[in-house]
Amino acid sequence: MIWLFWISFGILVYHLIGYPMILALLSIGKREKRVEVTQYPRITVLCPAYNEADVIERKIKSFHELDYPKDRIDMIVISDDSTDGTNEIVERYTGTNVSLVVQKPRQGKVAGHNLVEPTLKCDFVVSTDANSIFHPQAMKELLSSMLASDRIGVVGGKLTLEKNNQADSGEGVYWEYESFLKKISSKVYTINCANGSIFMIRRNLFKQLPVSAIDDFERTLMALKAGYIGKFNDRARVTEKTTTKPREEFSRKVRIISREWKSLFRHPSLLNPFKFPAVSWILISHKVIRWLFFLYVIGMTISLNVVFVSSLMNGFSSLWQWFYSLFAVGLDIILLTGSFEFHLENRGNGVKIFKPAAYFFTMFYASLMAFVSYLRGKANPMWKTVR
């Protein structure tokens, strides 16, 4: 039974430490090529929004503050049948280079993109979230990476999370880790997923998608399949407020991961190491192993507790039995306290010191429920704000 522990533990160590180390070593001496922007191609920014009255005005103002010629860029706010005054706020800014399209009935982000796609007359499309506030240089930075090579089809920017007064849910640390992986993966060859809060894609690659698709992931997969590569520019920044509770991230993670499973298996050839050696390695190491996080946790928990019970019965006859038993107790405590905090937060309470355990439990539980949702054929295309 102990072999199950070492296989599960080994895969997690590879995913969290081994894979980043390999990428980091391969990236040594490599620099991302960027060009100075002297010409200004036509850009259309797509900003889906559902009940974003709290942030949409700030979003539009950050768009107007972009360092980019106003006659070469426009933004379409696609309101997904918002009911909180979002439409009225956007209407106050229309008539310049901001326009409003209302999608009725509510169908989700990708359906909104599909709705406006036939009308787009631009060179590049930028997809962004309503609560992601642009840094003034964000557009030029995306373009400086995109124009570096005709092989580049997608460029992702960096999301920075601003902490609230309370401790955050752990999502800020996660996004810093993700940004680090994308940066070194981009240097080595390509990213496997853009960032939904801000990414640029060539107009010829921006096509209709199934409404169940996850926008930033599937569009990157389509670009890779078409022979393009994706790059990451950490100077193309947007900021968002971080969440404060791991439970706030749970439903979002389940929805995203279950849809990413569907997106990947619409493009199974990308997992073929003979056809796409680098891409398949990056996808499996970065994405697939993470989506199966629950398997490794279950594998370690079962195997360690079997050894623990056996050690109790045999009186801990070796140091290895002590090691496995202590590991089992530690993992059980993390899962139990994480579950406890997860449910406490659902009632509006919580204990600060339990938040890291709650984030671990959320990752475990979300990956499990996302896999179940994928197997059952469910893929909810609707999003909710977690603020």
Image (cartoon, grey):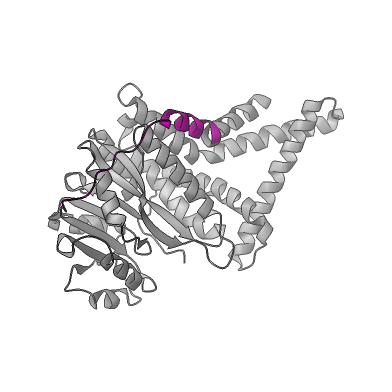
The residue at 38%/64% (across/down) is 131
Q: Is residue 13 above or below residue 380?
A: above
Does residue 352 appear anywhere in the picture?
Answer: yes
Whole-percent x and y of residue 196? 35, 52
Whole-percent x and y of residue 71? 14, 63
Q: Is residue 330 above or below residue 28?
A: below
In magenta stretch: residue 194? no
Foreground residue among 222 and 377: 222
Seen as rendered, the residue at the extreme right is 315
Whole-percent x and y of residue 356? 62, 52
Does residue 1 appear anywhere in the picture?
Answer: no
Q: Is residue 239 above or below residue 285?
A: below
In magenta stretch: residue 20? yes
The residue at 41%/41% (across/down) is 182
Which corner quadrant holds the N terminus?
top right
- Please state the extent of the stretch shown in magenta in the rendering: 17-41
**Which image quarter: residue 298?**
top right
